[in-house]
Image (cartoon, rainbow, N blue to C red):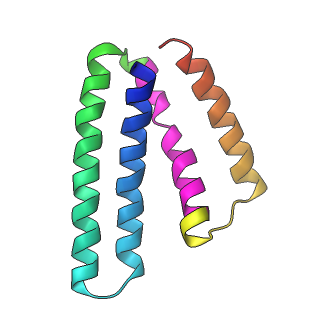
Amino acid sequence: MNTLLIVLASLLSCSGQLCQKQATVGKGRRHLLGWLAASVLLLAMAMLVWLRVLQTVPLGVAYPMLSLNFIFVALASRWLWDEALSGRHVLGIVLIVAGVAVMGSYT
């Protein structure tokens, strides 16, 4: 259950960041404010889930798990905006996955 909550917090946080990026892509005040409102809502939800995680998982274990955000954002930006993933990005993602797997074996 702890691992699922950590992944959920990371996904919500990542989604909030993606909304911020989307706010910069379009034009007009309505577009900007809509995406920023979505971002604030998602980031608030991420914070609430994160607080639940912190009740049950030691901070030294939980906090490094947020590095999942790097993976989610890199993959989503590739898919949504066709941003490049260099070999260094892919290597970094592989190393993050390995680190999260090691850290996640605690939960």
Residue 58's spot in the image, x, y percent? Answer: 37, 14
Residue placed furthest toward the bottom: 28
| Res 55 → quadrant | top left
Q: Residue pushed farthest top?
A: 106
Is residue 47 positioned above or below 54 on the image? below
**Against 39, is 70 above or below?**
above
Give me the residue at 55% from left, 19% from top: 103
| Left/right of residue 21 with respect to residue 35 in the rendered view | right
Asked if residue 74 is positioned above or below residue 49 in the image, the reply reads below
Work out whether 104 lies above or below 71. above
Q: Position of residue 40 (x, y in %)?
A: 23, 56
Residue that appears at 26% across and 25% down: 52
Residue 48 percent location from the top left of the image? 22, 35
Q: Position of residue 93 (x, y in %)?
A: 66, 43
Instruction: Say left or right for 20 vs 95.
Output: left
Instruction: Count how many numbered circles sit on residues in the image.
Output: 0
> Magenta stretch?
61-78
| Quarter occupied by residue 57 | top left
**Which residue is located at x 30 percent, y 22 percent?**
54
- 82 sits left or right of 32 in the view: right
**Was residue 102 drawn as part of the magenta stretch in this picture?**
no
Quadrant the N terminus occupies: top left
Magenta span main SS: helix
Name of the residue lying farthest toward the right = 87
